[in-house]
Amino acid sequence: MTTSPVQGLRRPSRRRGRIAAATAALASFALLAACSGPPKSGTGSTGAEVKLSASTPPARGEIDSFTWAVYAEPPTLDYTVAFDYPQNTILSNVCESLMRWTPGLTLQPGLARKASNPDPNTWVYDLRAGVRFHDGKVMTADDVVYSLGRQRDPKNAAAWAQVFQNVTSVTKTGPLQVTVKLKKTDSQFPQYMATAAGVVASRGGVEAAGKDYGTTGDLACTGPFKLGTWSKGQSIELERFDGYWGTKAKAKKAVFRILTDPSARTNAMLSGEIDGGYLIPTESYDRLRNSGVGTLWFGEGLSTVNVNITNMTGPLGDLRVRKALSLALDRSGFVKAGLGGAGTVTASLTTRAAWAGASEQTREAAFDGLPPASQDIEKAKALIKEAGATGKTLTVATSSIGQDVSLLATAIQAAGTQIGLRINLRTIAPNAFTALFTDPKAREGIDMFPLTYYNSITDPLDLLQNFKTGAYMNFADFSDKGYDALVDQATGVYEPERRMRIETEMQKRVAEQLPWIPVAEWPTAVFLNKRITGAPTTISYMYHPWAAGVGAADAGATR
């Protein structure tokens, strides 16, 4: 989410406008899932190959419990506001969605056994029979209508509300069938049904919990685990749900320990106090990799590290200044120091794996001719001089939340200083840094800040639509009417190859205009000690019931 805590905090596609053009429909959901998954490896700045995999070896037996580190305590586990790493890492094992994201980052049926698209503006979800909630009640179409309705209700301030902005109705059309009607064709909506946006909870259970839903007691969901003891500030326990409709979890209990300090998390893994965790601090990669107590794995994160431009009313409003900063950045140095050598320098805001649903020709076209990712100080100096920006001052937000944040901010300062700019660093407390994503006042006086963006679906449009006029993550108010038209056009095309050809043009436009400055691709990292195995290595863990597969690495182990 792979990234530092706060950098992962963003609301992917939930507050963005999408107006799609009507287009011919496809007969089935299959084409939306037509992606081949992540690449097998990537090369870091040191030249060493970082092997990527979809999963760790399968478990060889059951265990009583395992412990997992999370960097922060979720404020709530209500699925309507599950927009960040801690919430989704836990919730994905308790609450399930209509569709499912696989460890290979493809889509498959979830609580819906089938999704069909009889016309461009209609999606029909046929539900699995006999699925039970944790309280023993059987899931019905009424529960689905209610659950999606909570996302759409303005009173709930749901983080996923924008996924439903094109939805006109969600109705029960059979005991186990729900039909969604759209205002206009929306290629993104059915894909988001594999995220927390598509979660189904028991209407009776949610209503019984009332205002306490998500903070205490039962979450009224269907997953392989149910919520157990929540010791505030310390840990959250999940208990195996033996009435689960799918494959039973390998562990009887999963315990999530809340460890806010990166060093404390690392030390707990090294000592065996914690069995594993995602979001490994980059400064700990080598210690964990060489510890001998377990294995550090890498998988596709669909994540890019970027410099988010938040103010175009000053010097950064001149494209030449943005281009100069991009040319002056030492991306290789940052990858080596800030990402532990595990990333890959890039001039693209999207990852290559996000384009897996496209043909090879379209994938190559998306990356062909992008601006260089290599450093060119002399050219950058010339651009600054030409723009009349020599001596101008810019402010970059930084934080101690992780070295990926602090070192990228330092790299921006070094780049600007070399080419004649004055770069001030404004240090912000980790909790306050979060506000940069949600509060315009928190961004006042700040021109840039480090941002890692992860896709919630395997589609470049998830990121690229951030630059539409008025989009939630468009902090600098970048506006290009031609680009807006391309966003609408791509949103209105279901077939991946056709849609991604449009997205290729979008990719080139943002690469030229630099509303964000791309820096590196960053894989997901997960550490497992020798006792356990079975966790996926990709970012699928955000919406996939990953903990169900975690079990004993040794067939004889039961602890």
Image: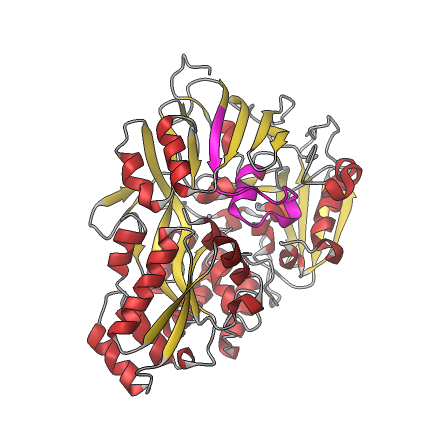
Q: Is residue 343 above or below residue 386?
A: above
Residue 344 in the figure: left or right of residue 538: left
Residue 527 screen position, x and y as percent: 38, 34
Q: Residue at x 75, y 56 (%)?
A: 155
Tell me which corner region of the image, top left, top right, bottom left or bottom right, holds residue 380.
Answer: bottom left
Residue 80 shown in magenta: yes
Viewer-nearest residue: 273 or 341: 273
In the displayed structure image, the side of residue 440 where residue 392 appears, left or right? left
Q: Residue 329: percent from the left, percent from the top?
A: 28, 66
Is residue 325 or residue 356 the one in the foreground?
Answer: 325
Which residue occupies 28% across, 31% down?
A: 291
Taking the spot 31% from the left edge, 60% from the top edge, the residue there is 346
219, 417: nearer the viewer: 417
Give the left or right position of residue 543, taking residue 283 as reference. right
Whether residue 384 is situated above or below residue 142 in the rendered picture: below
Residue drawn at (45%, 39%), measured in percent from left and top?
A: 103
**In this picture, is 434 found above or below 138?**
below
Q: Is residue 339 visible?
A: yes
Whether residue 519 is visible here, answered yes or no, is: no
Q: Which residues, given as a range, are shown in magenta?
A: 66-90
Residue 391: % across, % down:
31, 82
> Which x, y percent locates residue 238?
58, 29
Does the magenta run of residues contain 15? no
Colour pattern: secondary structure
